Image (cartoon, coloured by chain):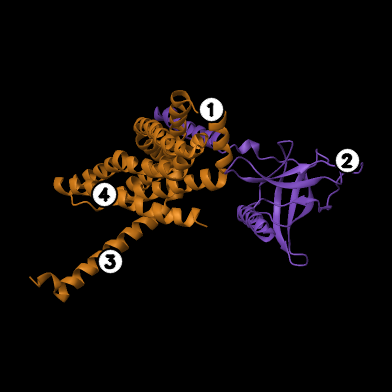
Amino acid sequence: MERSRSDVWVGLFVLLGAAAILFLALQSANLLSLSFQPTYAVTAMFDNIGGLKRQAAVKSAGVVVGRVDSISFDDKNFQARVTLALENRYAFPKDSSLKILTSGLLGEQYIGIQPGADDKNLAPGDTITATQSAVVLENLIGQFLYNKAAEGSTPAGKK
Amino acid sequence: MIGWLHPARVGYATRRKLADFGHGARVFYRLIALFGASMRRFGLVRDQVHFLGNYSLAIISVSGLFVGFVLALQGYYILQRYGSSEALGMMVALSLLRELGPVITALLFAGRAGTSLTAEIGLMKAGEQLSAMEMMAVDPVRRVLAPRFWGGVIAMPLLAAVFSAVGVIGGWVVGVLMIGVDPGAFWGQMQGGVDVWKDVGNGIVKSIVFGVTVTFIAVLEGFEAQPTPEGVSRATTRTVVVSSLSVLALDFVLTAMMFSL
């Protein structure tokens, strides 16, 4: 095919466009942070997961150590079954406990791992039952109102 | 008074609209089918990418920069009411990638490149160059329309990506350098809130669809123009009006399809 002077400029234009797409993918969407580390699966049972979603972070001491892989409902004991994909390079004691936490006041919910003291580590397929549910605002308010009502009624009963 | 309601008139108008529609659909089908042929003679497409893309780069990047500036200013005003001005980066990036990048680029592209396509092809028709080609057994759809169409389809997503990228930088200039939002929070929130496939990918899909829409309307209007100076001017106007409206309407449909699921 014949070459022409516009080749250079078209090439530069296409490269600029590709660079823009790359910039958007890497800088604003942070493609590189997607981890391709091998993971192992651990199951956890929660009474209430609140607003936890798939792909939510699993953090220990604030560092991301895994992701939430799947969330399902267990109708035997009416709990939420959350499967975590923890990175292979991190091992946790068998009696570690989980908490559902919120980053910031209005932020995303994530799972925090509190390491235990057991000598044995979590193995793939293990189930963690030492969990603390998400804080549900309505329950909190309900509890607060109930306590208030209890406070208000006790002195009345004494009279 | 009742003349335009006469059944014969209504029938004629309907038949003509349908014929126009069918003709447009057939030209569209031919343009799509000519993808391979256009790519084999890439020199023609390349010249069109040069003409439509490179020369639109200045207007696209300058507009992107200013849209980014304004988004950062307006976004900061809204977000600081809720005490979450750190989310500025995410807001700027999401609104550019999902909405403003493809749409504004398509509108500017219709004005900058679509009009010139229509005027060029319309004048070729008025000057009977297209008829002359047919006389020489050269298919004008293959030789004139298809390279322009595919050139526009290639150029448009690249321009939209440049627009969004420059806009994000513009938002950074105003948000971080001028207003003083923490740069770590600006980029961190953006990277946390923007998904590669859902946001960046769908934005690119949108810009490809708009590229096809705008370029096809421009090329068809030129090809269908009345071969008179007045006809060419009318076709050029119609290109801008029809493609802008189509882009905005399609944008709603695409957004509803992509992001509401």
Question: Disc 1 residue type?
Answer: Asp
Have a look at marks 1 and 2 and say if they share a chain: no
Q: What residue sits right under mark 3 in the picture?
A: B18
Mark 2: secondary structure: loop
Of residues A142 and A151, the one nearer the viewer is A151
Judge the density around disc 3: few (<14), some (14-19), many (≥20) Cα neighbours within 10 Å: few
Look at discs 4 and 1 and give the one toward the viewer: 1
Q: Which mark is residue A28?
A: none
Look at discs 4 and 3 and give the one toward the viewer: 4
Question: Disc 2 residue type?
Answer: Ala
Upstream in the sequence, badge 3 or badge 1? 3
Q: What residue sits right under mark 2 in the picture?
A: A117
Q: What residue sits right under mark 4 in the picture?
A: B241
Chain A tint in image: purple
Upstream in the sequence, badge 4 or badge 1? 1
Question: Disc 4 residue type?
Answer: Val
Protein chain holding label 4: B
Q: Say which quarter of the image contains residue B207.
A: top left
Mark 3: secondary structure: helix
Have a look at marks 4 and 1 and say if they share a chain: yes
Upstream in the sequence, badge 4 or badge 3? 3
Residue at left 51%, top 32%? A19
Asked whether the viewer can see residue B33, the reply is no
Chain B tint in image: orange
Q: Say above or below: B212 vs B183.
A: below
Judge the density around disc 4: few (<14), some (14-19), many (≥20) Cα neighbours within 10 Å: some
Q: What residue sits right under mark 1 in the picture?
A: B182
